[in-house]
Image: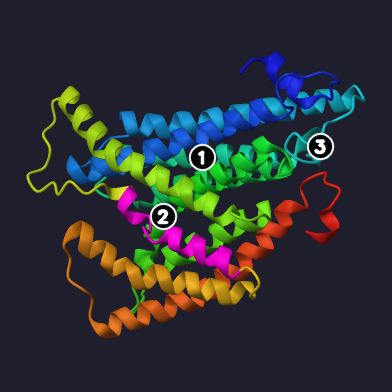
Amino acid sequence: MTTADITAATSVSSSRTVPRGLVPASVVLGGTLLSLIGLTWDIQWHSDVGPDTFFTMPHLFLYAGSAISGLASLAVVLLTTANARREKEIDPLVGGRAVGVFGRTFSAPVGYLVSGIGAALFLVYGLWDQWWHGLYGFDAVIDSPPHIGLLLSISITMVGAVMIFAVARDQGWGVYGVAGAAGTLLAFSMVTVLGLRALPGGPVNTVSAGSAFFSVMILFMGAYVLNRRGGAIAVGVVVAVLQAVFWWFSPWATELYADATGLPLRDYVDGVPGLPNMIPMSLLLVAVAVELLRGLPAWIVGVVGGVIITALSPVQRMITYGAGFPAAERYIATVVAGAVFGALAGMLGRRFGHMLRHLAPAKDNSHA
């Protein structure tokens, strides 16, 4: 991405071959996808090889993805600020309405402001992770405190990406971008949910309940942003494609990198990819349910989605890992928790989707 590309995207022009706003939005989304690739690779590395250090190839993918998104966001903010100071018209289709930052020192499109803040936080947590490795050496788990901070900061950048494309929801590229950005965020959030293992859940499987909550909420959010038939299915298809690609990529990249660095794979490698198997395979069923039950209150559809995910989660583990079915008490408690969290997720997803629709300089916001 060149300066000329961003300048053309942030100022209104009468003749264009590339839709305004598409270039910087695509760079931010590409950065988030690169981070997701690094994450699925890193998880598989922990599973199949073992502990790692700060400077590994999967980590570099994570860092590079966040850096790309952050630099693209910074470039748009700086160019928007320059245009505002020259009293040039600011295109609201590029990341949304520009807001003043630091006493109006900067004029930042709201979508790029959020994605940039996430990237800046990533830098802070990255320094903490480096200190953590220097203090304790190898990382034995994916959900260490600095890693959770890193995952949350990347999630903020991904939320910014959804906002950027939501502004252009009336454009063809905006529709595809919303589905891609929401699907990326949903897949990524399945790892952040691992932090819930530290909570006392009693008979409830907190990870399954958390996965149901984030899956339903983000799926609803994407569907309500697009506000068209097939919106939920579009997000579900994106997630399914990512899941399928990573199912092949994660073990392959891990074995290739292990061979290149002279490290052996563990003897008990089961061949089941880590991140892809965390993503509910029942998500497309939930997407279909959302489409079929559009006329019902969001919380009711959310209950259906939460129940589908938590009820079928043990079946997925049985198919992939050959695990046994959980005890009846634990299974029922988790499904009930899934219903409750699904109801909350449905309401929040609907509300977030409507909020994101209001970012667009659209003519029909009145009935969003």
| Three-letter amino acid code at the position of disc 2 | Met
- Provide the residue designation for mark 2: 190
At x 76%, y 36%, the residue is 108
Q: Is 323 positioned to the left or the right of 203 in the image?
A: left
Q: Which residue is mark 3?
A: 92
Extreme residue toward the bottom, this view: 329
Front-lying residue, 318 or 188? 318
Amino acid type at circle 1 is Phe
In the rendered image, residue 327, in percent from the top left (x then y), is placed at 23, 81
Q: Note whether residue 188 is visible.
A: no
Is there a contact, CB below 8 Å, between mark 1 and mark 3? no
Give the colour scheme of this rendering.
rainbow
Which disc is residue 122 wearing? 1
- Which circle's residue, 2 or 1, is located before the other in the chain? 1
Measured Cα–Cα span from mark 2 to mark 3: 32 Å
Image-quadrant location for residue 89: top right
Numbered range of the magenta stretch: 276-293
